[in-house]
Amino acid sequence: MSASRRTANPVLVPERLWRELELRHTDTVDLLTNDHLARRRRGEPHPVADFLFTYYRTSVAAVRRWHPGPGLILENAHLTERVEWRHYERASLHGRSGLIVNPSSVLSRCGSRITRAREIVDATASRPGATGCFGLHEWAMLYGTTDDDARHRQVPLRVSHARIDQVVDNSRLRCTHFDALRFFTEAAVPLNQDVLTRVGQARNEQPACLHAGMDLYSHVAAMEAGAPGELLVDTLVAAFDAREVDMRSSPYDLSAWGLEPIPVETPEGRAAFVAHQRGWIRRTQALRARYLDAVRTLESSSASRLAGAEK
């Protein structure tokens, strides 16, 4: 059920159908996150998977909650624990009752975050992808460091600190993502070809960037019940995939976690990274279109609801 198919008039979803969609959603999320939760219970960190639930400050419990997005009445959902969930209200159609997402409630709580994210995503979607950064942001985060001040001390390096510095010195840093650049070492920041700021983020983001694509997961999660569950899962899967490539192209040795490096310090590794970026552009531009459509649906549903209330 895509957001683009919905109209201002609510549609009732039979209980059997929405239960199936909910189960499919939770099963998918569990497959993606059960290992992460098991490691967390054991106190065992993971340099790839943990990032999505620490840096983005999202929770597995929140992601497991399937939402249909606005405009759909979930039959008999008022008889379930969903009645206690934020942003839902009672609704009826043709004598059958259930719960529907209240888009005005979502916008009241999340509107400022959605507005900011939509500005960035819309601008990013309008640009061609700029390949050629070769994922060197992780190298720039280690530039000029020693073993004593490396960021991920629990993860060994696959190259020496001298080699890291050499690769950065002999490359052109072309990072376009402010939230990556702000973790560069002080010595590496002036080496980037562009000066990046938080205020100018919408002017600099571009769709070949791994982190700009990963951020889509955070943007969708920030919509809470206003985002269709299918979109949330698809952006989460994409974020997992991007984070893996992100770390495989870093100077870290991830062999203990079964991950082979993408050696971007070599011509072959750079070619492999660019090939991934080209596929990433296609994948994330489709996700951006779906995100922007979901935001439009949320806003138009809220406007229609308010207009109806004023009659």
Image (cartoon, grey):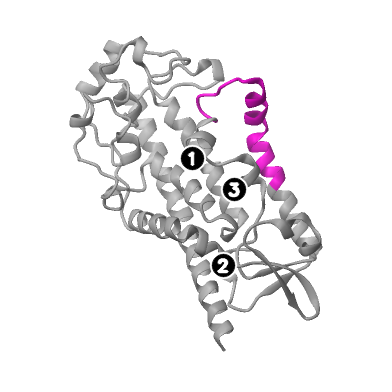
The part of the chain drawn in magenta is 26-49
In the image: residue 46, left or right of residue 84: left
Tell me which amino acid carries mark 2.
Answer: Pro
Residue at left offset 33%, top offset 58%: 126
- The residue under label 3 is 233
| Pointers 2 and 1 in contact (C-beta within 8 Å) | no
Whether residue 222 is in magenta: the answer is no
Q: Earlier in the sequence, mark 1 or mark 3?
A: 1
- Spatial CA span between label 2 and label 1: 24 Å
Residue at left offset 67%, top offset 50%: 65
- The residue under label 1 is 56
Tell me which amino acid carries mark 1.
Answer: Tyr
Magenta span: chief secondary structure: helix
- Spatial CA span between label 2 and label 3: 20 Å
Tell me which amino acid carries mark 3.
Answer: Val
- The residue under label 2 is 103
Residue 77, image quadrant: bottom right
- Spatial CA span between label 1 and label 3: 15 Å
Q: Nearer the viewer, mark 2 or mark 3?
A: 2
Residue 264, image quadrant: top left
| Image x and y of residue 103, in percent | 56, 67
| Image x and y of residue 230, in percent | 61, 54
Looking at the image, is 146 positioned above or below residue 65?
A: above
Residue 119, image quadrant: bottom left
| Pointers 1 and 3 in contact (C-beta within 8 Å) | no
Which residue is outermost to the bottom? Answer: 311
